Image (tube, grey):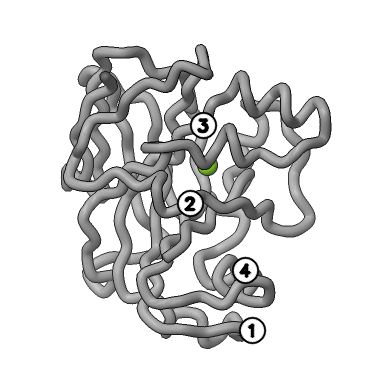
């Protein structure tokens, strides 16, 4: 399986990092080894001094497809969850400065903790509230009604380049409020008030 992620999909987050508003979805990938499941702890890597949390809604692809038309995109995912797109912001800043790929800053071990997945029919996908607390304090609060590119637009777009396969995951972008984590922090994330993630930084 593979992990596909969208950068710069919420205007307030683009603003906080002083990035340009994209004219097409900004896409990157993470390897399967980035995944953490079942609230396993995240081990802070030695190569960074600035690991940022990015809370995101994650789609789980339910059937194979490529060149998917936007109007059919909803047929390709049945479940949603939450994930953290951990980012080595210091490493990413250096790479961006040099115009180099972001892989080392985005795809390292443990950089993609994911929750259990829930059936999408139980939710209003265009109006999903999701939140991240760090040590019990609210850090990120998002709603999918603020996305620049919708779930279906993202699926249609990426499927022109990557064949989507059952089990692939799509991270759909983070709202504002990204910040550094520290060893000892406890991250808890909720989707429509339901706790989906609860793990520690070690
Ligand atoms: Mg992200």
Does the residue at mark 2 contact the one at mark 3 (Cβ under 8 Å)?
A: no
Residue at 23%, 18% (x, y): give it: 135
Q: Earlier in the sequence, mark 1 or mark 3?
A: 1
Percent coordinates x, y for residue 6 in the rendering: 58, 52
Q: Earlier in the sequence, mark 3 or mark 4?
A: 3
Q: Is residue 62 left or right of residue 102?
A: left
- From the image, tell me which residue sits under label 4: 158
**Judging from the image, what secondary structure is the residue with disc 4 in?**
helix
Vertical order, 70 against 20 (above or below): below
The label number, if any, that marks residue 67 in the structure image: 1
Q: Badge 2, how many Cα within 10 Å: few under 14, some, many 20+?
A: some
Vertical order, 141 against 184 (above or below): below
Residue at 28%, 22% (x, y): give it: 201
Q: Is residue 19 left or right of residue 8?
A: right
Residue at 64%, 84% (x, y): give it: 67
Vertical order, 124 against 31 (above or below): below
**Judging from the image, what secondary structure is the residue with disc 3 in?**
strand
Q: Quadrant of residue 92?
A: top right
Tag count: 4
- From the image, tell me which residue sits under label 3: 87
Q: Earlier in the sequence, mark 2 or mark 3?
A: 2
- From the image, tell me which residue sits under label 2: 31
| Cα distance in 3D space between marks 3 and 4 | 21 Å
Q: Badge 4, how many Cα within 10 Å: few under 14, some, many 20+?
A: many
Q: Is residue 10 left or right of residue 63?
A: right
Q: Nearer the viewer, mark 2 or mark 3?
A: 2
């Amino acid at each position: 399986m593979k992990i596909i992620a969208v950068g710069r999909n919420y205007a307030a987050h683009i603003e906080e990092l002083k990035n340009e508003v994209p004219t097409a979805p900004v896409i990157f990938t993470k390897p399967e080894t980035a995944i953490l499941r079942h609230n396993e702890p995240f081990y802070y890597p030695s190569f960074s001094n600035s690991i940022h949390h990015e809370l995101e809604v994650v789609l789980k692809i339910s059937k194979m497809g490529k060149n998917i038309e936007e109007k059919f995109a909803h047929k390709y995912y049945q479940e949603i969850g939450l994930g953290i797109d951990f980012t080595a912001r210091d490493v990413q800043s250096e790479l961006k400065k040099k115009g180099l790929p972001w892989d080392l800053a985005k795809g390292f071990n443990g950089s993609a903790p994911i929750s259990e997945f829930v059936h999408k029919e139980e939710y209003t996908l265009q109006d999903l509230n999701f939140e991240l607390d760090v040590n019990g304090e609210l850090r990120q609060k998002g709603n999918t009604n603020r996305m620049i590119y919708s779930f279906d637009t993202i699926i249609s777009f990426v499927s022109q380049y990557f064949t989507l396969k059952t089990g692939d995951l799509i991270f759909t972008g983070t709202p504002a409020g990204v910040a550094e984590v520290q060893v000892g922090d406890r991250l808890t994330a909720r989707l429509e008030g339901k706790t989906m993630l609860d793990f520690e930084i070690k």
